[in-house]
Amino acid sequence: MVAVRLLAWLDKAPAPARAGAVAPLVNSYVHAALSDEARDDLDIAMTLLLDDPVPEVRRALAEALSIHEAVPRHLVVALAQDLPFVAEPVLRRSPCLLDAELAEAVRGGVARVQTAVACRPWVSYAVADVIAAEADEEAVAALVSNSGADLSYEAFSAAAERFGTVPDVRDALFRHPDLPITVRQSLIARLGLALNGLMVSRDWMSERKAGNVVREACEKATVVLAAGAGEEELEDLVEHLRATGQLTPALVVRTACTGNIRFLEAVIARLTGLPAERVYAILVDGRVAAVTALFARAGLPDRVNGALLAALAAWRDLAKEECTEGDPAFPRRMIERVLTRYQRMAAGDVDDLLALLRRLAADAAREAARAKAEAARTKAAEARERSGRAAPHVDIAA
């Protein structure tokens, strides 16, 4: 009897009324103490709503069902295959859908559907891999920005490879705390290529000049990445740079001149196959002949030996003086000592490594000046704040 009256009402009620009745129907099914017959009646009524000609009614059903797990699965599965407007709520949050169903929705869906899946409270590794490899850029950006998404190395790589030059995706990747260092470096390189093309196409500078500017910018960024990398990350970064042809003598020299001997150790260990501990011991305490032989075994060009030896000597001297990389004065003191030592052995004024070291010295001087200026500003601000707090109280009444 209840079913007959309910079905008659659904047949005659206007669309807004049908849409408004959906949430009470679902809540009754989920929360009310119903007989088996009454529960079956509600199941039939909700199932018939899947055929409602008005999308807003089916959307209301999807909204109401999406927040519950104890609902008929066939309703959620059917709604997930409806129009994007209707399917979006269940794809975005229903706990009833399997990974296989979500992956199917991504592969066959429009951007709105893909983005709904990417924004779920939790996205598994399997579904995230499909989104990163096949979805629209909007969905990939949403996925990378979703703190509830489990992202594998493959997902990060696919997102960077497909949309690394798209600002929304690129920015989301750079902000992600778990972005692998190799993917981060590849994004930097891709961004450099895009900037190179832009500068040349706008006729801002020659192709050769633009290439030099971009290459140096990428090398600087890579040096910063290497400075903050752990042991395993350094190994991965070195292999990535080697495989992509970015492990150049200039990059090795630039990194060594910052005092990052661990990066030099990782490079030589990878190129020679020697244990990293043995390489590090030679770099730290080895004589010139032993270090030079190590460079030769690694296949480093003879012409960089002087710069690398100067960097090692400067690093050893500063270590004895207890000036470490954490000291604000370290970068400038390091490169100045390298430059002084290398100038004595430079082949002549036309020496590209000498020119590189002079640019590094100029950069270090600018960074040191900025750091001192910022420290001075901070100190002045603190003094003003203390002065304000310590101002004497004037009793006007007295």
Image (cartoon, grey):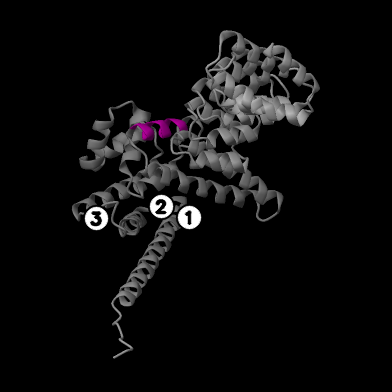
User: On the image, numbered disc 3 is attached to which residue?
Assistant: 323
Choose between 56 and 126: the one closer to the eye: 56
Q: Secondary structure at mark 2?
A: loop
User: On the image, numbered disc 2 is attached to which residue?
Assistant: 347
**Residue 8 occupies quadrant:** top right
| Residue type (three-letter) at the residue carrying disc 3 | Cys
| Residue type (three-letter) at the residue carrying disc 1 | Val
Q: Which residues are magenta?
A: 232-241
Dots 3, 2 in contact, CB < 8 A: no
Q: Main secondary structure of the magenta part?
A: helix
Q: Residue furthest front?
A: 1
Q: Is residue 239 magenta?
A: yes
Q: In this picture, is 222 found above or below 23?
A: below
| Mark 1 surroundings within 10 Å by alpha-carbon count, few (fewer than 14), some (14 through 19), many (20 or more) | few
| Mark 2 surroundings within 10 Å by alpha-carbon count, few (fewer than 14), some (14 through 19), many (20 or more) | few
| Residue type (three-letter) at the residue carrying disc 2 | Ala
Q: Which mark sits nearer the N-terminus, 3 or 2?
A: 3
